[in-house]
Image (tube, rainbow, N blue to C red):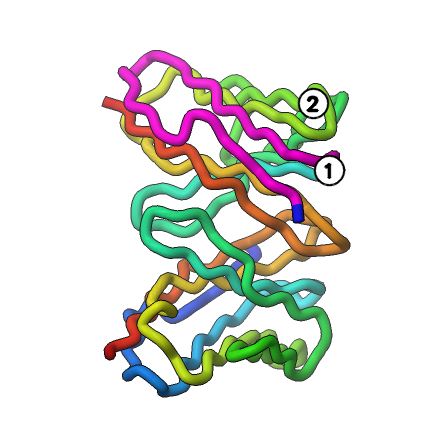
């Protein structure tokens, strides 16, 4: 099965700054996604990272706040822009492997002070 | 609003017992259903997937799906303390977009 890595694993950031999170997969995958898990909550889909085109965002998430890049079939980045304490969450990338199954990276734990 | 509902728990069972976790979903067109296990501080790990009505067994885990009742369950037989985690039910009804329930916290007591 594919190995998914994320950088950084955790970070503490000042409000108003931006953080870019990287997701690397050791094999080519068609579909990659970004999720957010707020403290004590379940996972919410932020967007689908499309290779070679703009990401598809879910309701409540916008490109200006969460710009996403997908330059190739093994790599994607999510930027959390102009951060506020409400952005403190775990950010997870996932891949669709096989027909339906989806697997998650280890996550990036973000704290905004 | 498409929803996935789970009992938040915590669900406490003694070691060796059967743990039963339940999930209901609102969108009748949903086709794929998943159970993830999440240990504290870790990312979700896929443990079961089910796509058709009936039971699917994998080791100590059995997933059950009833599309007419819009109900998915996970049974864990011979529960072990290492099974203590949060179990997340997820539904895929739009080509990969997973909707998650709130999760059920399971505690297996030695």
Is residue A23 located in the magenta-colored stretch of the structure? yes
Question: In which quarter of the view is residue B37 placed?
Answer: bottom left
From this view, report whether residue B82 is shown above or below residue A75. below
Real-space Cα distance between discs 2 and 1?
17 Å
Residue A51 at x, y percent in the picture: 74, 26
Quadrant position of the C terminus of chain A in the picture: top left
Would you say residue B89 is visible in this rendering?
A: yes
Q: Earlier in the sequence, mark 2 or mark 1?
A: 1
Q: Is residue A64 left or right of residue A96?
A: left
Residue to which mark 1 is pinned: A29
Residue B15 at x, y percent in the picture: 31, 82
| In front of the other: A108 or A54 | A108
Would you say residue A87 is visible in this rendering?
A: no
Dot 1 falls on a residue whose secondary structure is: loop
Is residue A110 located in the magenta-colored stretch of the structure? no
Count neighbours of disc 1 (C-alpha within 10 A) and say few if under 14, some if 14 to 19, many if 20 or more.
Answer: some
Residue A27 at x, y percent in the picture: 71, 36
Dot 2 falls on a residue whose secondary structure is: loop
From this view, report whether residue B102 is shown above or below residue A53. below
Residue at horizontal 40 percent and vertical 31 percent from the top: A9
> Residue farthest to the bottom?
B17
Residue B21 at x, y percent in the picture: 44, 76
Magenta part of the chain: A2-30
Q: Are marks 2 and 1 on the same chain?
A: yes
Residue at horizontal 38 percent and vertical 66 percent from the top: B104
Q: Is residue B95 left or right of residue B86?
A: right
Q: Which mark is residue A54?
A: 2
Chain identifier of the residue bearing label 1 in the image: A
Nearer the camera: disc 2 or disc 1: 1
Residue at horizontal 64 percent and vertical 26 percent from the top: A75
Chain identifier of the residue bearing label 2 in the image: A
Q: Is residue A83 left or right of residue A100?
A: left
């Amino acid at each position: 099965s594919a190995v998914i890595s994320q950088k950084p694993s955790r970070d503490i950031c000042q409000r108003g700054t931006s953080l870019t999170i990287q997701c690397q997969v050791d094999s080519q995958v068609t579909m990659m996604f970004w999720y957010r898990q707020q403290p004590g909550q379940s996972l919410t889909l932020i967007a689908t990272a499309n290779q070679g085109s703009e990401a598809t965002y879910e309701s409540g998430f916008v490109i200006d706040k969460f710009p996403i890049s997908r330059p190739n079939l093994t790599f994607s980045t999510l930027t959390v822009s102009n951060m506020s304490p409400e952005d403190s969450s775990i950010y997870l990338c996932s891949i669709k492997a096989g027909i339906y199954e989806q697997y998650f990276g280890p996550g990036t734990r973000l704290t905004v002070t | 609003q498409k929803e996935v509902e789970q009992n938040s728990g915590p669900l406490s069972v003694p070691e060796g017992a059967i743990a039963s976790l339940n999930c209901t979903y609102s969108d009748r067109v949903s086709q794929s259903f998943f159970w993830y296990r999440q240990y504290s501080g870790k990312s979700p790990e896929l443990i079961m997937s089910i796509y058709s009505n009936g039971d699917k067994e994998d080791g100590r885990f059995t997933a059950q799906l009833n599309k007419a009742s819009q109900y998915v369950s996970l049974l864990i037989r011979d529960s072990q303390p290492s099974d203590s985690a949060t179990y997340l039910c997820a539904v895929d009804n739009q080509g990969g977009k997973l909707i998650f329930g709130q999760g059920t916290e399971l505690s297996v007591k030695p």
